Image (cartoon, helix red, strand yellow):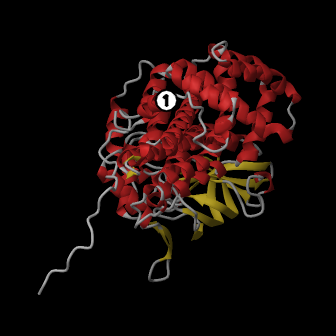
Amino acid sequence: MNTPTATHEVTNQAAPLAGANLFDGHRALREALAFHAPGLDLADLRALGAAVGSAGMQAHARLANLHQPVLHTHDRQGRRVDEVEFHPSYHALMASVVGHGLHGTPWAEGPGGHLRRAAGFMLFTEAEPSVMCPVSMSYAVTPALKANAALHADWSARVTAPVYDARPLPMAAKNGVTLGMGMTEKQGGSDVRSNTTRAERDGADAWGERYRITGHKWFFSAPQSDAHLVLAQTAGGLSCFLVPRWLPDWLGEGARNRVEIQRLKDKLGNHANASSEVEFREALGWRVGDEGRGVPQILAMGALTRLDCALGTAGLMRQALSLAIHHTGQREAFGKPLAHHPLMKNVLADLALESEAATALALRVARTVDRTEHGQDPSGHEALMRRVLTPVAKFWVCKRGSHFAQEAMECLGGNGYVEEQGEGVMARIYREMPLNSIWEGAGNIMAIDLLRALRGGPVADALAAELAPARGAHAAFDRLADGLPARLDGLTEEIEARALSRDVALAVQAALLRQHAPDFVFEAFCDSRLARGESLGAFGSLGRAAPFDALIARANPIQ
């Protein structure tokens, strides 16, 4: 029997980008960290960079997304269980991200911990972004527990421990826990004041004031978390409660709380993470903070998750850019590698600029958190910048993400559009990008929040100080900076809020690049974003004098 003749030899296909240390290859991140935290120990980040860039971690990311979570509301005997089943790769990813202390751990660390965590958050997002949802919520909820000393005493050690414990057990029986948030309802969305879920006082015990909660949540992410902070209406107004999955032993050993999962969301992306709809049937919750103070509580938590939205999008941008540079450097067309063609150089260089600017702005917001949480803000400047730059970064970085991913996908052509059983990472990035822009307040919510922040202090003076290091370095930058004070001093109306958010973001990005990036990066950014503005439309519109090769070389993931 004759062996069939091969029809062709597979050539001119890019090898996978695997085995690279994502921290060592990220020069923009390393230099920004050196600027913000010059004494930071980088050993853990370097180890994390090697782990998340490995072929093994990439395989876990593929499998966790390919085999999506499955809800089991009942066991085969008909008993209510409300369990979510995950592929083993999901648990492997969670064990790694929690083991590197990217959830609640920074709250138990000293100065620099939030910056270390921010850099790690960006790096891990390159490996798999879905698991960062429960990680982000655990980070944001941890400090909120301080409003109930008893809850904080019992829960904080486990939520800051770098231990992932997926067992469905009461908190006291576990080595580590994760926390979630349940805020929005069908009728209100971001307008949480319209929530109808109600809470009725049920007494008091070792965890404080106890309530019975009845109602629902329309988006209840990571329902497998050990507890959620939930909003509900009380006699005193909208209030915040810790609702555990399992009740403490003094209320019945091994008893589940009455939080019933109705279904899992069928989402565009974020496939490895479970997002759900739930109903509370007199579920028990313990009040966190005063009655009627639920909105301020969630605003404080929301500011931290909004930071993570910017960090996560910056990480996804970096991953998409790395894949584009890697692919175009190997794939040939018309006699030479794609990356050697002038127009492709323009696209790659432009994407590199956007990625570095996003990293710079997101990390700057992380520095405001680190400084304010550790009492390193004697002038109050960092607190004011934290309030202003959080919505600005969330708005602009996330808004640019989807456009960025689409352009990076084009660099791979059809190879970028197909997924092939989860092996096509670029398509997964593209589906993921809109989430960070929508979650925790979409673009309009962020722009309006900036207007609210302008009422919180001398913002114009603080921003002028923030921009001062770049003054005189580029004419276009000076023009933008000159026009901001009047717009910040109460002269901007809501209909102009998006434009103001964009311009504050661009000005701060430029000032940061001036301080911790080479001059050619700062100049190319100002030329393209501030002087002419071409790159606020289609990427690949840099002027002919732009340092294309230098920008691409700086961004290459293989340094």
Q: How many marks?
A: 1
> Is residue 424 depicted above or below 343 in this figure?
below
Q: Is residue 80 left or right of residue 493?
A: left
Please report the residue visible at 69 percent of the width from the left and 48 percent of the height from the top: 441
> Where does label 1 land, which residue?
115
Tell me the quadrant of the picture where the C terminus can be found: top left
Q: Residue furthest front?
A: 335
The amino acid at mark 1 is Leu
Judge left or right: residue 67 versus residue 389: left
Please report the residue visible at 52 percent of the width from the left and 53 percent of the height from the top.
410
Element marked by disc 1: helix
x%, y% of residue 435?
60, 53
In the image, taking residue 419 as reference, residue 227 lies left or right, namely right
Quadrant that contains the N terminus: bottom left
Is residue 512 in view? yes
Q: Nearer the viewer, residue 406 or 229?
A: 406
Q: Position of residue 175 (x, y in %)?
A: 38, 48
Say few, some or many: other residues with alpha carbon within 10 Å of mark 1 (under 14 / 14 to 19 / 20 or more): many
User: Can residue 509 be seen in the rendering of this structure?
Assistant: no
Q: Is residue 380 left or right of residue 4?
A: right
| Image coordinates for residue 307, horizontal then vertical, percent | 59, 38
| Rendered position, 456 above or below 224 | above
Residue at the (41%, 51%) spot, across then down: 334
Instruction: Depth check: give the residue in front, 529 or 234.
Output: 529
